[in-house]
Image (cartoon, rainbow, N blue to C red):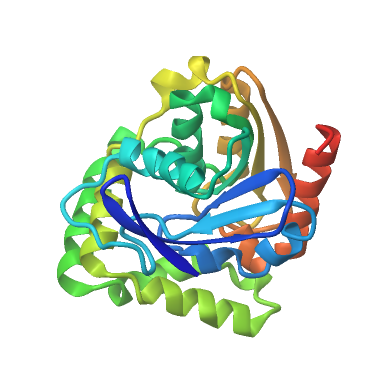
């Protein structure tokens, strides 16, 4: 693992493997460790860049409200720092997929394609108040108070065959810096990429998860229909597919890239 001061924030990252570059963008509340069982397998045939988004993991902490553009620009800064000079494959989880899409909207020539698992690209207006209230509670009370309701949706019991992976993911989520997580929550409260759907020219594969308690597959299917160049698949996984069904994630990514000659 390494750190770099780029785009106004210190970011922890890892680069492994050789071949077509893949950038892994973790979910809200996750870290680069969300990809621990995915990255090594993909690195057998591709160059894999994964990182802690600003405000997450061991990257620089955040406060107030983050800007989606800053998170998208972090990808550009890391890719350039890593010396990658060809279009990348972006694999994003949940809100991480929105970060990937924003990056592609700003720099279409820099992105080969996007694979989004349970992509979350907007916060409905009728939920905004509740999300902002949660942000305030997280800041003052920490993450543990949300665990009884959040963990079953994030890490559904039906997919907890690997107990150690579940416990590690739960611990990572609970260990989030409360101020940073509140800042990320506030960004999510105002997230809305829908005005930009028609402008996204990047080829996308969007994955709905049958066991997702936060992002129903029907919502992901509707998003795929709204994008100009997107296809949709539903898989028997959950909101953080890379943690609970890593082999399925790797197969899905490999199969899609193989169909594109990668």
Where residue 108 sits in the image (x, y, percent)? 53, 23
* Residue at (43, 20) in percent of width and height: 196
Where residue 259 sits in the image (x, y, percent)? 85, 34
Q: Is residue 258 left or right of residue 243?
A: right
Q: Is residue 253 left or right of residue 160?
A: right
* Residue at (67, 69) in percent of width and height: 37
Q: Is residue 200 above or below residue 21?
A: above
* Residue at (57, 60) in percent of width and height: 240
Q: Is residue 250 above or below residue 146?
A: above
257 and 28: which one is in front? 257
* Residue at (20, 64) in percent of width and height: 179
Q: Is residue 129 above or below residue 237?
A: above
Confirm whether residue 54 shows in the render: yes
Looking at the rendering, which quadrant does residue 227 occupy?
Answer: top right
Confirm whether residue 245 shows in the render: no
Where residue 25 sits in the image (x, y, percent)? 52, 51
34 and 106: which one is in front? 106
Looking at the rendering, which quadrant does residue 116 occupy?
Answer: top right
Quarter that holds the C terminus: top right
Where residue 134 sits in the image (x, y, percent)? 24, 58
105 and 235: which one is in front? 105
145 and 76: which one is in front? 76
Q: Is residue 2 left or right of residue 93?
A: left
């Amino acid at each position: 693992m390494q750190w770099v001061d780029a785009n106004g924030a210190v970011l922890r990252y890892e680069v492994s493997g050789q071949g077509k570059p893949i950038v892994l963008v973790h979910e809200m509340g996750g870290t680069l460790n969300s990809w621990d069982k995915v990255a090594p397998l993909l690195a057998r045939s591709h160059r894999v860049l994964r990182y802690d988004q600003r405000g997450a993991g061991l990257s620089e902490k955040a406060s107030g409200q983050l800007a989606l553009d800053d998170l998208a620009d972090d990808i550009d800064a890391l890719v350039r720092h890593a010396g990658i000079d060809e279009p990348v494959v972006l694999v994003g989880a949940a809100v991480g997929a929105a970060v990937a899409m924003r990056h592609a909207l700003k720099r279409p020539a820099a992105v080969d394609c996007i694979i989004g698992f349970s992509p979350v690209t907007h916060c409905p207006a009728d939920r905004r108040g509740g999300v902002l209230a949660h942000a305030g509670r997280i800041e003052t009370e920490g993450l543990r108070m949300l665990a009884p309701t959040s963990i079953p949706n994030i890490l559904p019991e039906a997919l907890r065959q690997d107990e150690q992976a579940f416990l590690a993911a739960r611990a990572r989520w609970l260990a989030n810096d409360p101020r940073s997580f509140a800042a990320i929550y506030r960004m999510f409260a105002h997230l809305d990429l829908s005005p930009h759907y028609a402008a996204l020219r990047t080829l996308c594969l969007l994955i709905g998860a049958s066991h997702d308690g936060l992002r129903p597959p029907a919502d992901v299917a509707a998003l795929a229909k709204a994008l100009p160049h997107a296809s949709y698949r539903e898989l028997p996984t959950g909101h953080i597919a890379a943690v609970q069904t890593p082999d399925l994630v790797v197969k899905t990514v490999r199969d899609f890239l193989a169909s594109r000659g990668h």
